[in-house]
Image (spheres, grey):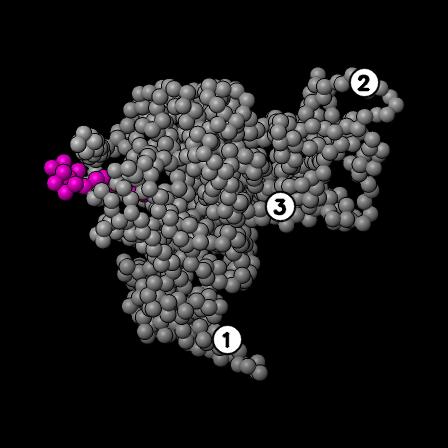
Amino acid sequence: MNLQDPTTSELSGAYADLTEMSVEDAVALEVSEMEAIIAADPSSGRAEIAIPAAPVIPAPLPIAKRAVSGRYNGTSGGWQVELRVDVDRVRPMRKLSGDFYSVSGGTTTYFGSFLVKNPTVSVTATHVTIRGLGEFTWGAGFPVINVTIQRRLISQPQAPAALQFFNQINSPGASYNCGFDSTHFRTVRLEIDRASDVTSPVFSSYNTGALPSGGPARNLTITSAFAQAGIQMVPTSGADVINIGEAGSGATWSNAELHRSMQRHFLLFRNVPQWVVWTAVCQNHEFGSGLLGIMFDQLGPQRQGCAVFYRGLAGSTAEALRLQLQTTVHELGHCFNLLHSWQKALATPPGVDRPASLSWMNYPWRYPVGGAAGFWARFPFQFDDTELVHLRHAFRNNIIMGGNPFTVGAGMVNPEIMGDTVFDESGLQLAISGANNSFALGEPVVVKLTLDSTDRRGKRVHPYLHPNTTLTNIVIAKPNGVVVAYEPFMDHLVGPQEQEIAGDYKIEDSAYIGYGKGGLYFDQPGNYQIRAIYHALDGSRVLSNVINMRVRYPVTAKDEELADLLMGQEQGALFYLLGSDADSLRRGNDAFDKVLEKYGDSPLADYVRLVKGTNAGRAFKTIVEGTNQIDLRKSDVAEAKRLIGALNTPACRVDEISRAQSMQRLAIAQRSAGDEKGAAESMRLGTRANEPVKAKAMAK
Amino acid sequence: MIHVMARSFRASVLLLAWLGWSCSRGQPGGDRGAAVEQAMYPLHIALHDGFQNHSVTVLIDGRQVYRKASVSTDLTISRADAFDTQAEATPHIEVAVEPGGARAAIDVKAVETPFVAIELSRDGKLLLRPSKTEFLYQ
């Protein structure tokens, strides 16, 4: 099994032209007198299989067979796959989709998703075969997907699905035998808590026949409304009463207060992508009685919680119950990353606005044909088809609570920065933090990485946290949604080294990630997301938290000129190398000189001092062009001290670790120059409060 | 004569009703005596779809009643901001948005339509929609 692509088998690359026809291909070539194309009937919402009548043999009594749609799970090599087949049962969307997870050591990590938008569906008396070209979140080598499922009688258990990948010339790749898991495409745990000042009954169910509507009469609860979309909502046992005091003295909720209460009362809350969602039933929001509900969770990992407000919803009339149901399903729909019907074009990438959609996600009073009355008279109490496809088949991080931010989600090709570890027994914890949350355009972006043990017995680890070694990777999601892996400007080979960390003993490092083989990584204003991945000795991939960083637009002419002076390939290389005399980087050094000369009082000039001071403190060898001679520029300790010493202020923008390391380098230069006293002082300034912890760990 | 008296009575009832509405909601300028004296009516103005870091200025009868930078629509509720104010019976509302330079104006009947929505369309046009009923969001 290929470790980079779960569609590829170990043999598929080597024997691409010599493969035997697969069983699935053989079945496809058999006489297909019973073949039919499953078609969705929009009027009934059910698939009908058009089976041509046999001309001679009288048709036997129909024997009920099991539908095949639903969720399947399979494992092969280091991969787990969740497969979703959607060709029959209620409102079939004729789609095939799935998610891959990689298993490495003690960790299970989301890898990527795929979707077949337009599969061909062939049905014989014995099998259903679904086949089509998939869209993937990674560059799949074998992008054609074939799923074959045996048709079984209703009295028999559900058959497994044979999932087989092919390349474009029909050579088979990886295959998975996937056992049937559920008739639902996804399962989400739902916790509903109530604020203590809500005295009216909280919604339980509504009979859609109580008032005129556009669909069949049925009793709907929150969970059954989603079940009809193919989503299983499993209520948790964690129902809680929220003290209204948490909403402050005014007893009206702000979004921040709701978020805080979610963290406090949501038993399953972890602030990571997971299939759990929280709903708060409250009385008042600070926006007033017009706010019926809100998906308030728009900070950090988003879409984990929503709230409904009974000041505008309370009551037991049919109208009130109908609005309670619609509002609650609507808000939960936002948690699944569904936008309002008339705002679909604002998704990233954009969808198509559907202001006349008879969907949970529309506002009844915005309905263009008769307003609220017209909407309710026609509303069948369901999501529209496009929303149904999203709910059932969206790439996992575009829908999972805590995944991609609200509105970011219809994107089909996107490496998965949010690929969280869903199962982690590595015993390690990696944290990433930025020296600042926002950076000026051109300002070097430096991150701090910390590795510690969650195993009280301690863990043996390698100490290489800096991405230079590639034993720790950094991924960056840019403002345009493109996700790139940071590639260090130079590869660093490291020898085998192990040490034990436990308790307070942790490893930390800081890394400049603004420039590498991919050029400048933060060259556009906007919001970035950054995550680190530590490759542990046992093969575990330990994922860090995700941090958000903003690169600000230059506001003034000074900002713009500073950005111009600090940005550029040569400047990036100088930041990466902590300075250089190389003639090829002369223009970068000239720009840095201009920064010190013209904008020496700017906080950004500190980065230049760090670079130029570090470089001044070391001797620099240059090969004289056209000769074998080396030109040695001696260390300028006084200049190094002047520049690096200026960083020793509380207002300095340079991060603490980088400053400490620069002082330590200065101390070494001073000692080499015979200045023992100065060296001791620099070493003292370069010793951070937590340095002994790291030093002790490194000493092992 | 009866017709005139009836109309006058109806107007008085409406005025008192709106004053009561205003006071009960704690709106600015909700002092009943002052409102009667100036014949002012409550007006709720809400900024809805289309705003993204815009600067918005609202004038009523030439008086600036709202000015805010970095106004953005919360797409989860299609609402960017809202404020309550007081106006004469048929105020002239002017709205200006930057960047983009969009401008729009409308005369409303504060008694009949005391709610006004401001929306910035995708092609940069300002739409002002008076409403008889409170705006609902979800």
Give the Cα distance between marks 3 and 2: 43 Å
Whether callout 1 and callout 2 share a subunit is answered: yes
Residue drawn at x 16%, y 41% is B39
Element carrying mark 3: strand
Above or below, A446 relative to A377:
below
Q: Which of marks 1 and 2 is nearer the N terminus?
A: 2
Read off the residue under disc 1. Answer: A584
Above or below, A91 relative to B38:
above
Above or below, A282 relative to B131:
above
Whether callout 3 and callout 2 share a subunit is answered: yes
Q: Is residue A100 left or right of residue B55?
A: right
Read off the residue under disc 2. Answer: A60
From the viewer's perspective, is the residue at label 3 or at label 2 nearer?
Answer: 2
Q: Which chain is mark 3 on?
A: A
Q: Which chain is mark 1 on?
A: A
Q: Earlier in the sequence, mark 3 or mark 2?
A: 2
Q: Which chain is mark 2 on?
A: A
Quarter of the N terminus of chain A within the rendering: top right
In front here: A7 or B131? B131
In front here: A300 or B70? B70
Amino acid at pointer 3: Phe
Read off the residue under disc 3. Answer: A136
Give the Cα distance between marks 1 and 3: 41 Å
Can residue A234 be seen by looking at this rendering? no
In front here: A125 or A343? A343
Q: In this view, does B34 lie to the left or right of A516?
A: left
Count neighbours of disc 1 (C-alpha within 10 A) and say few if under 14, some if 14 to 19, many if 20 or more.
few
Q: Are marks 3 and 2 in contact (CB under 8 Å)?
A: no
Q: What stretch is highlighted in magenta?
A: B29-46
Q: In this view, does B42 lie to the left or right of A179?
A: left
Residue drawn at x 69%, y 33% is A39
Amino acid at pointer 1: Ser
